[in-house]
Amino acid sequence: MSSAVDDTLLDDLGRLSEVDSDGLLHAAALSGAQVRATVEAAQEAGIARLAGAQPRALVLITRPGLSPAVAKLLLALLGKACPVPVVLTDTAPTWLGPLDVVIAHTDDAGDTELAESIDRARRYGAGVVLTAPEDGPVAAAAAGQAVLITPRVPVPPGFGFSRALAGGLIAVTTLELLRTDLGMVADELDREAERGHMQHESFVNPAKSLALRLAERTPLLWGLDDVATSVAIFAAQVLGTHTDLVCDVAAYPQAASRTALHRAATRASAVHDIFADPDDLDPAQVSPLRVFLLAVSAVATDPVRRLAVDAFPTADVLAPADEITADETTYAAVLALRFQLAALYLGLAAGTTGGTTRYAPARPRE
């Protein structure tokens, strides 16, 4: 059972400001600024040297923290039509060569295993794009040949998702593997941060509203398309960082194949009455399961989305395209930020975050 949530705190600006003594909500709201600063830093670090190159392979190195979620989202955005193979790995492969490009992110300046991977990639002549702190073994390994993108907008560890995503995006756009407008991404992130600002009450604040729907539940975060499923992976990361909620993440077709859980979720959805008074419900009859259907590229007419909505008519459908007009990359970034803000609000209201978040550095294998 997750921690009890004081939902009255969310609309009490004074108390909310007091418990958020480390300014975590403000740090999350800097996502748009992080994107702009990353684009500027990448240009100054020499990202243009990748222009016109057709890599043999794109290698995304994943390390503890935000890196796996960023890599999987980048892979999903590139899509099945990507003209080059994309490899996800936790260390640089031995077959790297001058025709390959490596993209990596870390908040841990002392990740010696990543430092070894970056050094190996450079020695083998591969192109390297790295978002990392400017000091430490990782940065030292990147010095000289790699495109090292260091933070310019100070945020706590674990709040660099937008910076990491922007670093990957500017690399793949420079390689002409993806088209996206990073200026639009930054602008829409600013707008989402404003919509989710703590001064806005729950009934008009999408992040607070999402937090309340997640509260004291077991969220089933089911993606209706590959990009949305990747955002769900990030959502699980921030929920696990700031709350003690246990959640399930899957693409909807995969979720449907897990028949026992799917049946339980269907039963929970069937008895859910949005007009019911929670005080009148028998706790023994209330299922903790709550289905959240995430859609980025899936429109209302897509077969998977229609099937999921038919099965779960009372489910929360989170589809940024229903609210704003942008590209898939922007929709994904906006939905990710909404989950991050919701996780923070929920953690602050439950007392599970607010100065306790610490990044656990990666340790080399023995």
Image: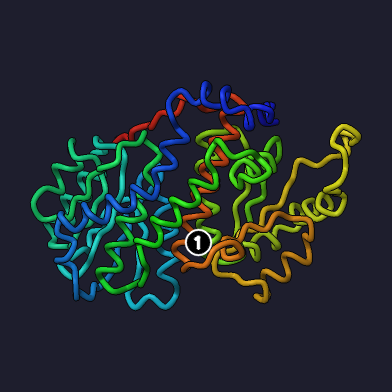
Residue 11 locus on image (x, y percent): 64, 32
Q: Quadrant of the N terminus?
A: top right
Q: Is residue 177 left or right of residue 269?
A: left
Q: Furthest residue to the left? A: 144
- Picture quarter with the C terminus: top left
Q: Which residue does the numbered mark 1 point to in the structure image?
A: 331
Image position of 343 (left or right of 134): right
- The image quarter containing residue 330 is bottom left
Q: Residue at x 71, y 52 (%)?
A: 291
Tell which of 213 and 324 is nearer to you.
324
Residue at (61% x, 47% y) in the render: 206
In the image shown, does 297 or 37 lie closer to the viewer? 37
Give the camera-side residue of 212 and 116.
212
Q: Taking 60 as reference, is 215 above or below it?
A: above
Image coords of residue 347 (percent x, y): 57, 31
Image point 28% across, 74% down: which residue? Answer: 176
Q: Looking at numbered disc 1 in the image, what kind of residue is underneath it?
A: Tyr
Q: In which quadrant of the rendered view does residue 52 lie?
A: bottom left
Residue 13 against residue 194 in the figure, above or below: above
- Indicate the position of residue 78 as horizontal and vertical percent values: 40, 69
Instruction: Indicate the secondary structure of the residue bearing disc 1.
Output: helix
Q: Position of residue 363 (x, y in %)?
A: 31, 34
Instruction: Identify which residue is drawn at 48% across, 52% down.
Output: 191
Which color scheme did the rendering employ for the protein? rainbow
Task: Please state if 223 lies on the left or on the right of 356 as rendered.
Answer: right
Within-10-Å neighbours for mark 1: few <14, some 14–19, many 20+: many
Residue 211 position by quadrant: top right
Q: How many marks?
A: 1
